[in-house]
Image (cartoon, grey):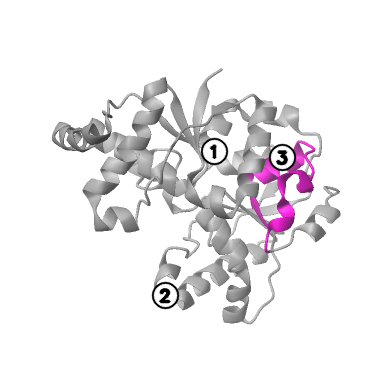
Amino acid sequence: MTEYKMFQGCTIGNRIPFIEASARKVFDKLGVKTSEAPFACCPDPVGFNSVDHTSWLAMGARNLTIAEQEGKDIVSLCNGCFQTLKVVNKELNHDEHEKAKINKILSAVGREFKGTTTVKHFVEVLHEVGVEKIKEMVTKELTGLKVACHTGCHYNRPSELVQTDDPMKPKKLRELVAATGATPVDYEEEMLCCGSGVGNTEEEPSMQILANKMDSAIAAGAEAFVVICPACFQQFDTNQKKAEKISGKSYGLPILYLTELLALSFGIKSDEMGMKFHRSRPKELLEKHGLE
């Protein structure tokens, strides 16, 4: 069995550690082996990369060399971290000039990027484990639960580089959700950004984008959102009240990370994962589907 170096990123470990808890429990159940590494910030694929591309490459490359040193691949729990590490890896493997420049920088800390590790999103790893294996682990089938799937932007794009899924109609998340017995609904705004990025500079349009997502999902019958990115999770969960003020509506939609949904279907209690720390309380949903 392949052992991965787990890259959880800054946001999960520091702000929403219950997501790490659910991931570890699901990985353990499915036999996905992970180990720790002294990784630093990925760093951010948008803001940091836009300000200083060379520093972005060097910091990303340093993280990659840590996994290379052990001959291990990386599994990322975060879309942004995944995109950064995957794109840095590809750019340096296809540009000898940039690679030499970055290795000169890394030599100051005794490191050298070789390009021998592979970076995977946790959705890819779970999909490779197999839908059938996941179905075998389900003890609480979630039949009747309708959810809106949201992959987020960085999981799929830039599609020519990350190549995780169909960028316009991603299937892997939906297939993993369906393995629990839950039903992924079709909603018009599924491929729309959650609005998290623009929220750093303009809050109102960010909340309007989020409200549009909420309205569309509810109209399609969704009882919850399933997400795979910590930035998206925080946008949906933490900022849902702000979106309600913009729209003048009350949503109350629980937000579940994919690993939380899988863990619940595996019979793991919500308290064991710390789901009580969600801002949009899932208690009513859990009781309705016999998951408490």
**Where is mark 2, residue-wise?**
202
**Where is mark 3, residue-wise?**
263
The amino acid marked with disc number 1 is Val
Q: First in sequence, mark 3 or 2: give its number.
A: 2
In three-dimensional space, the C-alpha distance between marks 2 and 1, rounded to whole angstroms, equals: 30 Å
Disc 3 is placed on an element classified as: helix
Viewer-closest of 222 and 287? 287
Eyeballing the image, is 178 above or below 69? below
Disc 1 is placed on an element classified as: helix
Magenta residues (range): 255-279
Residue 42: x, y in percent?
39, 45
Position of 82 with respect to 217 (left or right) is left
- Dominant SS type (magenta): helix
The residue drawn where x is 51% and y is 56% is 231
Circle 2 or circle 1, nearest the eye: 2
The amino acid marked with disc number 3 is Ala
Residue 160: x, y in percent?
32, 41
Is residue 106 covered in magenta?
A: no
Disc 2 is placed on an element classified as: loop
Q: Point out the image quarter for the N terminus.
A: top right
> Which corner quadrant of the image does residue 95 belong to?
top left
**Where is mark 1, residue-wise?**
123
